[in-house]
Amino acid sequence: MTDYHDHLETRDPAEREADLFRRLPDILRRASAAPAYAERLKGIDPASITSREALATLPVLRKGELSTLQKSALPFGGFIAEAPGSFGRLFTSPGPIFEAEAAVTDPWCAARGLFAAGFRRGDVVLNTFSYHLTPGGFIMDSGARALGCAVIPAGPGNTEQQFELIEAYRPNAYCGTPDFLKILLDSAATSGRDISSIKRALVSGAAFPKSLQEKFAEHGIEAFQAYATADLGFIAYETSAREGLVVNEDIIVEIVRPGTGDPVSEGEVGEIVVTTLAPHHPFIRFALGDLTATLPGLSPCGRTNMRIKGWMGRADQATKVKGMFVRPEQVAEIGRRHPELGRLRLLVERERETDAMTLVAECAGASEDLVAAVAATLQSVTKIKGTVTLVARGTLPNDGKVIADERNYG
């Protein structure tokens, strides 16, 4: 068993940097074949973008604006030159945001992160990310199968059926949110089901605090985390060193001052901006709205790429709850559907190691029927269950905040 997925992970950092920026001009030319990128990159000579300093002069595309841009030119907003039929799969994520999966092996570049988490050929993987319309399940599925693993496409929820699958196939690896793995462990303990075959895990989509890491370790599960998105796939992944997340190969990660495209100094917290070198569907300076900071030096595990501290909050008010993004536009949609409500604020908290959200809504006359109706709308719009609290008009501050992430991970 080798320690690394391939030789790229241990290259001299200067060699990697030179390779990325040698390839970038061709990617910019490919991107410019799409009308939206052609407009954004007008007047720019791709041959001149051969350094981080040059890259920082290009405009930033913010994930928060992508849904609106796509609506103006369905399905991809003019950011993809190729026709939808040229891709392997087509998805939608909350927003809505439309995504395309290239018809290639491991299109989301997940195999490298799964390998670092200990996944190997012949493993049986229980994949509990959703396969319904969104890319999550397929991101992990394609990476695991590229490594030679067998995948159980379980999806989330329905713990009883999950137990049947686990006891029949005896998977030794898990992919999914850390929250759902905890649910499986707790439910198995109370119902007497045997899921002890699971020995390793790759978790993403939600916070992975030390308390959960310790809980999984008590059950003999070595769990690692990855930072991935439905647009880009794997961006960074945890290794055996347990010191931050190592950036994936074939992408360029910048950390910029939130609301700008200006790179921050090393170690300063800023917004993650990613440029991909995927020829079928490149992203140029795609700002994700997530905050992080770089770690100095190289990882003790021997991988030589940039390291980031992991997810450190949101640069905008959109936030991730149970692996799904919730956006201010969605809160506004709830208000449009219930004109009897005044100001709205979505509170996101942690309850018993699980994400929970409460919609606080002003109204003149509260009733149980209204609470139930708004709760149903909340789930319909966000695809996540939450509670609703109705308060008197004028209770919420007039500060423009509609999503308040109050999670404390200790």
Image (spheres, rainbow, N blue to C red):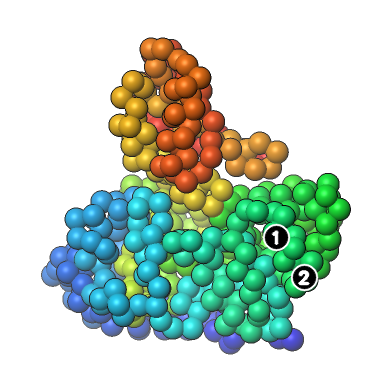
Specify the quadrant that holds the C terminus.
top right
Task: Kindly identify the residue that appears in the image at 26 percent across and 63 percent down.
Answer: 75
Please report contact status of discs 1 and 2: CB closer than 8 Å, yes or no: no
CA separation in Å, label 1 and label 2? 10 Å
Task: Kindly identify the residue that appears in the image at 66 percent across and 36 percent down.
Answer: 351
Question: Which residue is identified by label 1?
Answer: 162
In this rendered view, identify the residue nearer to me: 265 or 388: 388
Q: Is residue 113 above or below residue 68?
A: below
Few, some or many C-alpha atoms within 10 Å of disc 2 (few <14, some 14-19, many ≥20)? few
Q: Amino acid at mark 1?
A: Gln
In this rendered view, identify the residue nearer to me: 384 or 80: 384
Please provide percent x and percent y for residue 251. Answer: 43, 73
Kind of element beneath mark 2:
helix
Q: Which mark is residue 249?
A: none
Q: Is residue 361 above or below residue 264?
A: above
Please provide percent x and percent y for residue 168. Answer: 77, 70
In this rendered view, identify the residue nearer to me: 107 or 369: 369
Q: Earlier in the sequence, mark 1 or mark 2?
A: 1
Q: Is residue 376 left or right of residue 350?
A: left
Kind of element beneath mark 1:
helix
Q: Is residue 67 visible?
A: yes
Q: Which mark is residue 168?
A: 2
